[in-house]
Amino acid sequence: MRLFRANLGKLRRRPASWVTFLLLVGLLALLVFFIVVATRQINDPQTALGARQFVTFPAAYELVLQLVLSLGGLLAVTYGAAIAGSEWTWGTLKAAVARGESRVLYTAAGYAGVAFFTWIGVVGAFLAGVAVTVLAALVVGAPLDGMTDVEALSRMPELFARAFLAVSMNAALGFAIATVARSQIAGIGVGIGVFFLEGVASVFLPEVLKWFPFAAAGAVASGTFGQGAAISSGLGTRLDPDVAIPVVLAWLIGSVAVACLWTERAEING
């Protein structure tokens, strides 16, 4: 707990924490803006009605959260990689080991802090996205009555639990890659490469790639999205959402274990 609290204090001051969050919120606001512009310019009534669901509650709750996950999945990888890589390039890991800290506990606490901040980022981006969506709804004249829909609000805890699991795994993967590479740049670059490579390969090998980390995370996160989640990717074959949960947990635990064991056995120089 002491190491975890120390890591939270450290991450709160890291530029990567704020830059990643602001980038996520900025991209989310930009997407909502484009949706509003498109909605106002569409002449076909049926198409316009479909576009308006993005700013119509309660469906907008799920759509905003899915937008957050679509944008935040890759950002979680880069955030985990940036934090883990900095432990090597900035020499903070060496300093911690020199004062007698357990390498495994220090690494595990470091990841726990990263996961906690990704959860805060998801919640913060969701709230910002809802606020932007409310403004967009007022602009296009969409009703706000659905914001208090009890059934929709009751679904949100499970949606967030699945979202937290998905982004935690993404962050763990980036964290492990950067730890093995001992570099922020290499960790971020490889993490982004794996992210896009898996997406491309899933078109050709959907039955195999559905067990891979990002595809499984997408399946977990889409587990309880209803009719409002129209932007969900239909490409390839997804795992059953409940089957995907242990798969994602296995990738998460495996990634953290690799990071911890690599740090434990690594030779720290410099």
Image: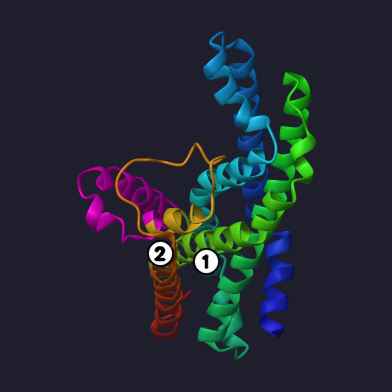
Residue 141, image quadrant:
top right
Between marks 1 and 2, how big is the CA–CA gap? 26 Å
Q: Which residues are magenta?
A: 187-215
Q: Residue furthest top?
A: 43
Front residue of 37/243: it is 243
Question: Does residue 160 appear left or right of residue 80 in this picture?
Answer: right
Question: Does residue 236 appear left or right of residue 62 in this picture?
Answer: left
Residue type at numbered disc 2: Ala
Residue at 25% over, 47% down: 201
Task: Name above or below for residue 76 compared with residue 90.
Answer: above
The residue carrying pointer 1 sits among few (fewer than 14), some (14 to 19) or many (20 or more) residues within 10 Å by Cα, namely many
Is 204 included in the stretch rendered in magenta? yes
Residue at 42% over, 72% down: 246
Q: In the image, which disc is placed on residue 84?
A: 1
Overall secondary structure of the magenta section: helix
Q: How many marks?
A: 2
Q: Is residue 92 visible?
A: no
Q: Residue 172 placed where, x, y %? A: 48, 66
Q: Residue 220 placed where, x, y %? A: 46, 59
Residue 121, image quadrant:
bottom right
Q: Residue 180 placed where, x, y %? A: 39, 69
Q: Residue 218 placed where, x, y %? A: 44, 53
Front residue of 34/270: it is 34
Q: Is residue 36 visible?
A: yes
Q: How is the model colour-coded?
A: rainbow
Residue type at numbered disc 1: Ala
Q: Mark 1 or mark 2: name the one nearer the start of the chain.
A: 1
Circles 1 and 2, Cβ within 8 Å, touching? The answer is no
Q: In the image, which disc is placed on residue 244?
A: 2
Q: Which type of secondary structure does the marked residue at label 1 adopt? A: helix
Task: Name above or below for residue 69 compared with residue 39.
Answer: below
